[in-house]
Image (cartoon, rainbow, N blue to C red):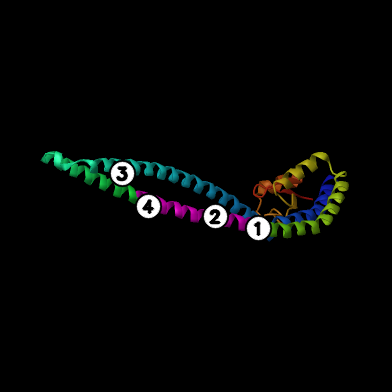
Amino acid sequence: MELKAILDYQEIDKKLFSLEQSLAKDPNKQKCAQLNQTARDSQVKSNQLEEQASAIIKEMDELQKTIASTKKHGLEVLKADPEKMDEDEIDELLNRKERVASNLTLLDKRLTKLAETINQILSEFNRTIKLYNDAKVQYQKFKAAYDQKVSELQPQMNAIKTELTALAKKVDKETLEKYNKKREDKIFPVYVQLVGNACGRCRMELSASAISKLKSEHMLTCENCRSIIYYL
């Protein structure tokens, strides 16, 4: 009697499980999940790009200060009067001028490179923001379609749940708790009949000792799919 009650309950629950699976595998829901992930990834990417840009802008500011300082030093070098210097001092002055010019060239090249990098980051940032915005717009469209399907199926699901509530009163509390735990773990059907010498759900062959135990105790948990095999 106890087995019949839970099997009757499961038979009705099959309808609810089927509808739930239909919603879980709905293309619109899956697309929503993909778009949601795209939006999250884009947000992370945009934050990373902002951090990179901030670091480069800071470096450019420091570099411009260095360039300004180097130019100031260069002007001071240019102010020196060669007429008042001996040969060694003139050579040193020329070397200083050469070093200043070389440093300014290197600094200008680095500044140009940083400017190119910041433009690349800005371009990538704009693409990322567009991807984020597009994903959010598309998400709303697919979510609306999914919500429409949920709305259409909800009355049917509610009716089944009402029927299950009535049937649950005929099922032993411990048996129902065990059933619900397995169902929550996506093990369905929970109770399956022995088919030949195999599990009625996953078709795994049972050993001779398992068959003997099942025929003796009438129930056995499948080692492979974790459904409960019953034997009448």
Magenta stretch: give its range: 110-138
Determine whether label 3 and label 4 are within 8 Å by CB. no
Residue 115 % position (x, y): 41, 52
Q: Nearer the viewer, mark 4 or mark 1?
A: 4
> Disc 4 to disc 1, how far (Cα)?
38 Å
Residue 213 % position (x, y): 71, 44
Q: Which badge, 4 or 1, comes first in the chain's sequence?
A: 4
Which residue position holds label 4? Answer: 112
Which residue position holds label 2? Answer: 128
Mark 1 residue type: Val
Q: Quadrant of residue 33?
A: bottom right
Is there any visible trace of residue 210 in the rendered image? yes
Which residue position holds label 3? Answer: 71
Mark 2 residue type: Thr
> Disc 3 to disc 4, how far (Cα)?
17 Å
Mark 3, secondary structure of its residue:
helix
Mark 4 residue type: Thr
Residue 50 % position (x, y): 51, 47
Q: Nearer the viewer, mark 1 or mark 3?
A: 3
Which residue position holds label 1? Answer: 137
